[in-house]
Each structure stands twice: as C-alpha cells, then as structure tokens.
Image: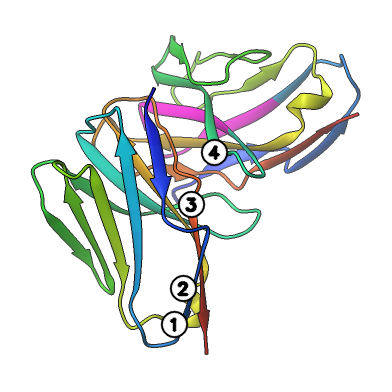
Amino acid sequence: EAQVTQNPRYLITVTGKKLTVTCSQNMNHEYMSWYRQDPGLGLRQIYYSMNVEVTDKGDVPEGYKVSRKEKRNFPLILESPSPNQTSLYFCASREGQGIGGYTFGSGTRLTVV
Amino acid sequence: SQKIEQNSEALNIQEGKTATLTCNYTNYSPAYLQWYRQDPGRGPVFLLLIRENEKEKRKERLKVTFDTTLKQSLFHITASQPADSATYLCVPSNDYKLSFGAGTTVTVRA
C-alpha cells in the first residue's frame, strides 16, 4: 500500500531533550515536506526537500532541522524542544511539482513539557 | 505576503444539497490550486488539483473552478452526504512552498 509512515504517533517529552520524528514513504516520491498544525493557525510548512540532499526552509523553520540522505526518508529533528513546539506534525510527499497531490502521514502529536 | 481566505469557518447544510466553498487569495499568482479534505486529528487527503489554464475540473460529486482574474476558487460538493462532513482546505501553489488556507468545516445534516 502506498503510504507515508510517521513515527511515533504520540510523544511526550521534556524541554531540551533532543528528539527525532521519522518519516518514510514507499512511493519513490522526489518531494517531501514537514508541517505543523496548531488550532486557529492551520497547517504551516516547516521544511521541504526537492530530492536527496536538497532541502529548504518553509514558513516556520526555527527550532527544527531536517536531513534527506535517502529518497524514502525525511526525519524531523528537534535539537532542544521547547513548549511552543507542542503541536500536531505531519509529513507529506509527492511525485514532483504540479503532479497530483500530496500524500500525508497520519500525524505525530508532540507535547513538550 | 500572500494571503488565503476561505469562506466562513463553518458551513451547515442539509443532506442532498450542494455545498459551495470559496477560496480567495491575494498577493499571489499560483500556477495550480489543490483542495484537500481533513478529518479531526488526521492528515489531509488530496481531492483535486486544477491548473491555471483550466477553468473547471470534476471528480465524482466534486467540482472545482479556478478564476485567475478574480483570484478565486470555488469548491462544490453536490448531493452532499453526512460522510462529506469534514474540513476542506484550499492550497494555491507555484512551487514547493505550500500555503494552506485555514479551512472550511462542512457539516451535512441527515
């Protein structure tokens, strides 16, 4: 089944403790992206990647890092999480620009205390 | 900066009627526009993509129009069903940077 898999689904962590949210797609898509969704603010793009080793900032990149060493994986790294990064995170992928829509993962609900 | 506005936060309609959702954008000239459906706590699901040179696109009970002069897209759900209840997101785009509208929540009453 074609899908985007995120792990974990739920995570509670403490301020300052580094964490990684994994994202993997099995569709050989070139493009991958991370979003956060907060009540009243909608979905906001954090980082995106056009292909392996090619990444760029979205609208809200502060406090996050990404890497794209393999085509299928696009992990989101929070080096020093803070409470304002408590949010619902989604990873998405698509074949290329202007080709079809994005396939989203099921989401990761992160709470930073 | 670009701005995306989707009509009224919520739309309540009777089963069988047509729901019409509006998406207006400013300070932007997207090459294409996408519509997604999102259920609470779940990832958005892609519905339709319409390009700037297309006026209208249909998929089953869904119809999307794209007016680049008015900077507006209309999204129609015909013969609505309770299962259509969800939040619908408008996403105009030119490149790899995406901006999502806040969404319109549709509730279809049986």
Residue type beneath disc 4: Leu
**Residue B81: mark:** 1
Q: CA distance from mark 4 to mark 3?
A: 10 Å
Mark 4 or mark 3, whichever is nearer to me: 3
**Residue A75: mark:** none
Q: CA distance from mark 2 to mark 3?
A: 14 Å
The residue carrying pointer 3 sits among few (fewer than 14), some (14 to 19) or many (20 or more) residues within 10 Å by Cα, namely many
| Residue bearing mark 4 | A43
- Name the main secondary structure of what is drawn in magenta: strand
Q: Secondary structure at mark 2?
A: helix
> The numbered mark 1 sits on a residue in which chain?
B
**Residue B61 image-quadrant placement:** bottom left
Q: CA distance from mark 4 to mark 1?
A: 26 Å
Which of disc 3 and disc 2 is earlier in sequence?
Answer: 2
Which residue is rendered at x = 39% and y = 80% of the image?
A: B80
**Residue A17 image-quadrant placement:** top right
In depth, the one of A92 and A52 nearer the eye is A92
Q: Secondary structure at mark 4?
A: strand
> The numbered mark 4 sits on a residue in which chain?
A
